[in-house]
Image (cartoon, helix red, strand yellow):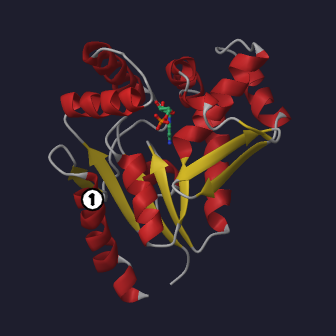
Amino acid sequence: MGNLIITIDGPAASGKSTAAHLLAERLSASFLDTGAMYRAVTLAAIRAGVNMNNEEKLLGVLDNLEFQFATQKRKMTVCINGVDVTEQIRQPEVTAKAWYIASSPKLRNRLVQMQRQFAAGKKRTITEGRDQGTVAFPDANIKFYLTADANERARRRQAELRSKGGTESLEKIQKAIDDRDKSDESRSVGPLRPASDAIVVDTTNLSIKEVVEKLLCYVKEKCLKKS
Ligand code: C5P
């Protein structure tokens, strides 16, 4: 069989990023965190002082800087013009403003092209985001859509933030997640939704290990048997 492409889409804090990393490790696959691409362009636009409503200026940011995305062990490193911004793209301001990039048709189109280029040179790719199974890779070998109860997702995000010294309340985190879900689901381009042929996995009551095992079972059943 040709290149293997596995897509994992889902809302914020549904566990898709961790699951995708671990699955990539198990399958010796490359890993692409497409949210990091939206975040990197957002960070660059903030730094350039660009009006976030000006699509042409945002495109200029993407055109005039060199973005590099590379998978390292369990982490995707992001560089802008050779400078590592892997940590900076996780800042709350970047998270809050990423929707400007996410709702621009032209920017999305370009980022989707970059995602396809990334996968084109790889034997196996696991790519995670919001539109990977619906728009970027409609012919993927297998598509997953991970979901989890909104309270559980907020609890997971709080635990993650606490481990880094964060003190945000559960309510505040829950509200930020709800807002992001609504914005991701309602935009006209690349909205968050499961592909019609996606396997939907509710991770609310599953440990990350259980999620990975479950995904692995589907992959073995649907893809690897034929190779
Ligand atoms: O996944 P992460 O939280 O890092 O994504 C940041 C933002 O980028 C999301 O809230 C979403 O608006 C946007 N995004 C997107 N399409 C993707 C991945 C992320 O619109 N494929």
* Amino acid type indicated by mark 1: Lys
6 in relation to 179, above or below: below
Residue under the image location 31 percent in, 41 percent down: 14
Task: Where is residue 55? Give x, y as percent.
Answer: 69, 22
Task: Where is residue 74? Give x, y as percent.
Answer: 51, 55
Q: Residue furthest left?
A: 205
Side of 26 relative to 156 (left or right):
right
| Total tally of numbered discs in the picture | 1
**Residue underneath mark 1:** 209
13 in relation to 129, above or below: above
Can residue 105 be seen by looking at this rendering?
Answer: no
Task: Where is residue 190? Give x, y as percent.
Answer: 48, 38
Residue under the image location 33 percent in, 19 percent down: 173
213 in relation to 52, above or below: below
3 in relation to 72, above or below: below
Residue under the image location 38 percent in, 87 percent down: 226
Task: Where is residue 217? Give x, y as percent.
Answer: 26, 72
Give SS at disc 1. Answer: helix
Can residue 223 be seen by looking at this rendering?
Answer: yes
Side of 94 relative to 199 (left or right):
right
Residue 93, quarter of picture: top right
